[in-house]
Amino acid sequence: MCNVPTINRIYLNKNLQTYFIDELHGITSGEQLYNSLHTASPTSIRINPNKIDYGLQLPQVLWCEQGYYLPQRPKFTLDPAFHAGAYYVQEASSMFLEHIVKPLATRPLKVLDLCAAPGGKSTQLISLMQRGSLLIANEVIQSRAHILSENVIKWGKSNCVVTNNDPKDFGFLEGFFDIVVVDAPCSGEGMFRKDPQAINEWSEAHVDLCSKRQTRILHDIWDCVAPGGTLIYSTCTYNQKENEDVVAAFLQQTGAECAHIPLQQEWKVVEHEKNGAVCYRFFPHKTQGEGFCVSVIHKRDGKEFVPPRKTPKSVDISIIEQKNRLHYSNLITDESIVYERQKGVMWSFSKNYRKLLLDIYAHCRVVHAGIPLVETIGHKLNPLPGLAFASSFNQTILPKYEVDLPTALRYFKKEALTLENLPSKGWIHLTYQGISIGFVKNIGNRANNPYPAAWAIKMNLQPELMWSIVEYR
């Protein structure tokens, strides 16, 4: 929780309360917003419907069918279901994306999440999209792109590519995307209550810098939106300079128009229009969540996407031909293609975008595409942890072994496990509360643990803090 002296200090000669009153005049009460910064932040999660196919006995986020509030903030690191991608810890206000996208997801969509890390909106989009859709989740900062990759792999869908590129790099996909989501880097005023670091980094000069960067990002990616497509622009800040003013200037420069989104009165979301820019605003004194602002921009015209005539050859992957793919076909239950990236490492990817995958690899820095299946060593197939997280994983191919809470956390801490009454030697599929969590190789006196060291739990396993979201069934 933020204290008043710290907040006032970063605003220098401008009292925070006065700042909000001036900045939000005609939109909401700056005084009430100021007072709300001294209340506790709610904790919310969004479940993965492919892994938790039941409702939770928790208060629901009103605008998101799969969103829930927790009574207090637990140690998420000490819940195996969290590591298995069974849910995502996401700020409730930003879950409003579901209300925008769901009416559009009545057919397969091609979607770009441009500023995607750490993965909240990407995993939400994956859950909303129909079979035959494609998501490219991009993050310009390399370290954050790898965090995004981990979260997307754990979510378990093969129709997603994670890239590490500047917005301008997607020019080869002009007119391609039905939806582009730009959750733009911002000054972070909406996170003051939750993140003290956001307060320390705030300045009026930073607000100005952010608004210029946001405008550049929108213009850099606009050509990639298909005619009739949608650009969703959002920030987690309050000021109009980064919200209404950015959107209004963009509309004037492009001839685009904002869409109106239906609201329910009990949500207490504020619709504000300024110079044609329609913004949907979330304030912590009105809604149970942090500060958030979103606009939905409709593209009326533009160039249609033209697929490349030639398939790129100089890419560092090779797609396994159909006759050889049968070697891997029993691993998964869908009809994805299989491709090899690093030597001996096989991945599955949506067959609908086989040719496009090569083009993406030719133009982008791809962190991953699809689902990691197996590593091949001679004639042996060693299952990779990502296979266990995949919603298409064929769970009948290996012996299954249910573990308890402490054992599941020891697996995610990458400890060698001693498991009693294992069904056989060799590879064993582990589950916790019916949720697939990974594989171990039983060698008799112990079970070797291949869980990636980069993903492993670093903290000590404190028994008194262990818990799981499944307790709320």
Image (cartoon, rainbow, N blue to C red):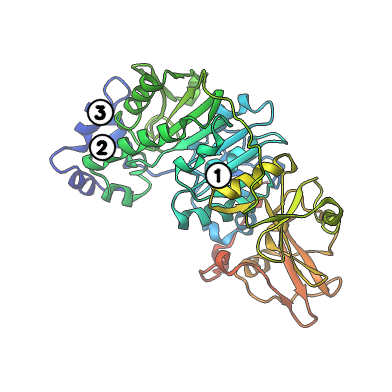
Residue 171 can be seen in this image: yes
Left/right placement of residue 270 relative to residue 373 reads: left
State if disc 1 and disc 3 touch (CB < 8 Å): no
- At label 3, the amino acid type is Glu
Residue 464 vertical position relative to residue 165 in the rendered view, above or below: below
Kindly indicate the quadrant of the structure image that contains residue 131: top right
The numbered mark, 2 or 1, whose residue comes first in the sequence reads 1
The numbered mark, 2 or 3, whose residue comes first in the sequence reads 3
Q: Which residue is mark 2?
A: 208
Q: Of helix, strand and loop, which one carries label 1? A: strand
Image coordinates for residue 225, horizontal then vertical, percent? 53, 29
Judged from this view, the residue extending furthest toward the left is: 13
Q: Which residue is mark 3?
A: 23
How far apart in space, not on screen, are marks 2 and 1 (Cα)?
Answer: 27 Å
Which residue does the image show at 55% across and 66% down from the upper left? Answer: 454
105 or 359: which is nearer to us?
A: 359
Q: Which residue is mark 1?
A: 137
How far apart in space, not on screen, are marks 2 and 3 (Cα)?
Answer: 14 Å
Left/right placement of residue 360 relative to residue 421 reads: left
Image coordinates for residue 211, horizontal then vertical, percent? 31, 35
Left/right placement of residue 75 relative to residue 110 reads: left
Which residue does the image show at 63% across and 59% down from the upper left? Answer: 80
